[in-house]
Amino acid sequence: MVTFGAIAPVGAQSVVTSVSIADIKASCHTGGSDQACIAAVEAYIADIRAAGLPADQKDALLAQLVVELGSIASSLPANVRARVADAINIIANEITDPTLASRIQVAAANVEAGIDLGGGDVSASPA
C-alpha cells in the first residue's frame, strides 16, 4: 500500500506530496537534523515538480512552505535557524519568479537572524 504525507490544495487542483509540511517542519526545526531537513524539502520540491503545475502555482506552494518554516524563527536556537535558512535557500532556487526568489533569499537571511516570517514577506508578486 502507498501512503502519502499530504494533499496540498492549489486552486482547483490538489497536489499529492510524499511528505507533509508538518513533517518538513519536524525535520527542520528543533529535534530535526540537517540531513533530514534537506531530504524532506527536496522530496516536497520533487513532488511539486512532478505535479506539472503552472509556474505561479508551484511558486505559491513553495512560498507557503517558506512561511511555515520561518514563522517561528525567533524561538529557534541559532543552529536550527541556520538549518532552516539553508532549506529556504534551496526552495528559493526552485522559484521561477525572480522577484519572489529574491524575496525568499532575503527571508532566509531574516530567519537566520531570528526574525519570524509572515505571509506578506514572501507572497507572489502581483501580475
Image (spheres, helix red, strand yellow):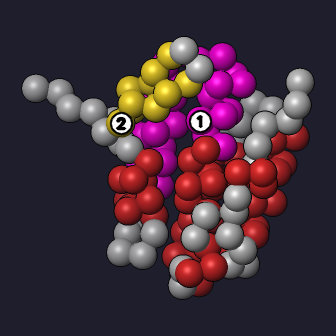
Under tag 1, what secondary structure? helix
The quadrant of the rendering that contains the C terminus is top right
Query: Is residue 119 shown left or right of residue 70?
Result: right
Q: Are marks 1 and 2 in contact (CB under 8 Å)?
A: no
* Label 2, residues with CA under 10 Å away: few <14, some 14-19, many ≥20: some
Under tag 2, what secondary structure? strand
Query: Is residue 68 shown left or right of residue 15?
Result: right
Quadrant of the rendered image containing residue 62? top right
The quadrant of the rendering that contains the N terminus is top left
Rendered location of residue 99, percent (x, y): 87, 40
Residue at 46% over, 32% down: 8
- Residue nearest the viewer, comparing 39 with 88: 88
Any magenta on residue 117?
no
Any magenta on residue 47?
yes
Q: Earlier in the sequence, mark 1 or mark 2?
A: 2
Magenta stretch, residue numbers: 38-63
Q: CA distance from mark 1 to mark 2?
A: 13 Å
Rendered location of residue 7, percent (x, y): 39, 30
Could you say which disc has been placed on residue 80 in the image?
none
The answer to whether residue 117 is above or below residue 14 is: below
In this figure, which residue is indicated by the disc labeled 2? 6
Q: What is the residue that sits farthest to the left in this orientation? A: 1
Q: Please state which amino acid type lies under the numbered disc 2.
A: Ala
Query: Is residue 74 shown left or right of residue 105?
Result: left
The answer to whether residue 14 is above or below residue 86 is: above
Q: Please state which amino acid type lies under the numbered disc 1.
A: Leu
* Label 1, residues with CA under 10 Å away: few <14, some 14-19, many ≥20: some
In this figure, which residue is indicated by the disc labeled 1? 61
The answer to whether residue 63 is above or below residue 89 is: above
Residue at 75% over, 68% down: 109
